Image (cartoon, rainbow, N blue to C red):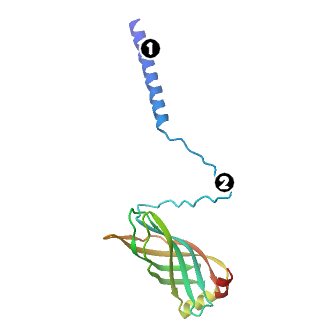
Amino acid sequence: MDLGIVGISASVVTLLYAGWALVRYLRKRPEAQVVAAPRALMPPIVIPRQGPHDLQVLPDQFRVWLDREVPEIEIHFYGINYLGREVTGLEVTVTTFQLDRYAHIQNVSSGDQGKIPKRSSRMLRCQRPLSDSEIRIFKKASVGRYSEGTVMVRARAFAGRKTVTYQPMNGIVIKGTIGRHDERTAS
């Protein structure tokens, strides 16, 4: 008889411990908070951080201007500084730009883009004039056509004495257009 009471007591203690552990687990879990935003406000764009970068360069758009006095390509990026201090001497270089099957352009650089404050971002621009052969290739493509290309990008900056770099292994998709100079003033 004593063995039955001991067995039942052990079972009750085990069940009580399991219930207590479950209550502790549920208390530790944060509840999801849902905040209703006004319809007029656009939600912020959340870009997940891809890997342990101190500096990241994400594509915005490109524009190929064929009817300017000097035809050129402009490629716009977002420069993101994840560090707790500002980065200075920022240089961004597009090592390769490929538009569909039409053109490969190499070495479009930004020069010195200045600085990005700590834990913030800003717009960056790379541009260079097009060669005669590149102009002929781009004229074969439809002017004003919305296109998709790929860029290989490299960025370097200084955070104090530390040099920070960003150079993804794969190309990054970028969208843009081949435009005319008079389109710029109209928009």
In terms of image quadrants, where is residue 100?
Answer: bottom right
Q: Earlier in the sequence, mark 2 or mark 1?
A: 1
Label 1: element kind: helix
Rendered residue at 66%/84% (across/down):
185
Residue 10 visible in the displayed image: yes
Question: Mark 1 belongs to which amino acid?
Answer: Ile
Q: Is residue 109 above or below residue 78?
A: below
Q: Position of residue 148 (x, y in %)?
A: 60, 75
Q: Which is nearer the eye, 129 or 1?
A: 129
The part of the image, by quadrant, that contains residue 60 is: bottom right
The image quadrant where one finds the N terminus is top left
What kind of residue is marked 2?
Answer: Pro
Res 50 label:
none
CB of mark 2 within 8 Å of CB of mark 1?
A: no
Would you name the residue on which mark 2 appears? Answer: 38
Element on which disc 2 rests: loop
What residue is at 46 percent from the left and 82 percent from the top? 109
Q: Residue furthest top?
A: 1
Instruction: Work out whether 44 lies above or below 165.
Output: above
- Relative height, residue 163 to residue 18 (above, below): below
Q: Residue at x 57, y 61 (%)?
A: 45
Residue 94 spot, x, y in % from top left = 47, 78
In this rendering, which labeled residue sits more in front, label 2 or label 1?
2
- Find disc 1 in the rendering and name its residue: 8
What residue is at 47 percent from the left and 65 percent from the top? 120
Q: Residues within 10 Å of mark 2 (few under 14, many from 20)?
A: few
Percent from the top left, x then y, of residue 43? 61, 58
**Cα gap from disc 2 to disc 1, whole angstroms:** 57 Å
